[in-house]
Image (cartoon, rainbow, N blue to C red):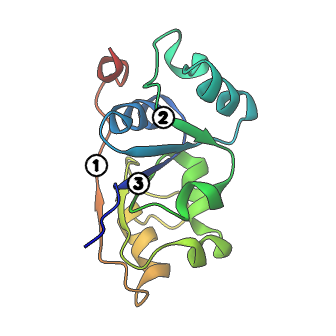
Amino acid sequence: MNSRPIRVSVLGAGSWGTTLASLAAANADTVLWARNADTTRRGNEEHVNHACLGELPLHPELRATGSLAEAVSDADVAGPRGALARRAWRIEGHRTLLRSWISIISLTNGLEQGSDLRMTQVIDGPHRGRGVPRSAAATAPTSEIHGVR
């Protein structure tokens, strides 16, 4: 039986998303989706996210991308984080990119503005009946920077 390493995707390159992605990269093939091209470039070339974590180094195996399709199409676990990731999650086109067995862990605190839905409800709604096995929620720690040190 062939098995391949688990692939993790974190959607949102703020301090919490970047910290989680860097920690995950120590144990799994991990990609961080960022909307800012400079954040993506510096993450890949310099292994830092200056805007959110200053000079703290990111795991050297962490990859960053600006392409949502690249971030989720080969992932086994995806974690949307932040307002931008919530909006991206609502985009119709991404649904066909997801593998049927993907686990989705919401990394977003609170409710979605406008709908007042929890992120697990936002995730489950469009994917119901597509074979998505589960979604779960995790909240950010008080200070994300401590996770990178």
The residue at 66%/29% (across/down) is: 39
Mark 1 neighbour density, 10 Å: few (under 14) some (14–19) many (20 or more): few
The residue at 35%/60% (across/down) is: 4
Q: Amino acid at mark 3?
A: Arg
Q: Amino acid at mark 1?
A: Ala
Q: Nearer the viewer, mark 1 or mark 2?
A: 2
Q: Say the numbered circle drawn on residue 88.
A: none
Place of residue 12 in the rendered image (x, y in percent of width and height, measured from the top left): 54, 43
In three-dimensional space, the C-alpha distance between marks 1 and 3, rounded to whole angstroms, equals 18 Å
Mark 3 falls on what kind of element?
A: strand
Seen in the picture, residue 95 relative to 35 is either above or below; the reply is: below
Seen in the picture, residue 76 relative to 143 is either above or below; the reply is: below
Q: Earlier in the sequence, mark 1 or mark 3?
A: 3
**Between residues 53 and 41, which one lies in front from this camera angle?**
41
Q: Which residue is mark 1?
A: 138
Q: Which residue is mark 3?
A: 7
The residue at 46%/15% (across/down) is: 57
Q: Earlier in the sequence, mark 2 or mark 3?
A: 3
Quadrant holding the N terminus: bottom left
**Between residues 136 and 95, which one lies in front from this camera angle?**
95
Mark 2 neighbour density, 10 Å: few (under 14) some (14–19) many (20 or more): many
Seen in the picture, residue 58 relative to 112 is either above or below; the reply is: above
Place of residue 126 in the rendered image (x, y in percent of width and height, measured from the top left): 50, 80
Q: Amino acid at mark 2?
A: Leu
Place of residue 47 in the rendered image (x, y in percent of width and height, measured from the top left): 54, 21
Q: Which residue is mark 2?
A: 62
Mark 1 falls on what kind of element?
A: loop
The residue at 68%/42% (across/down) is: 35
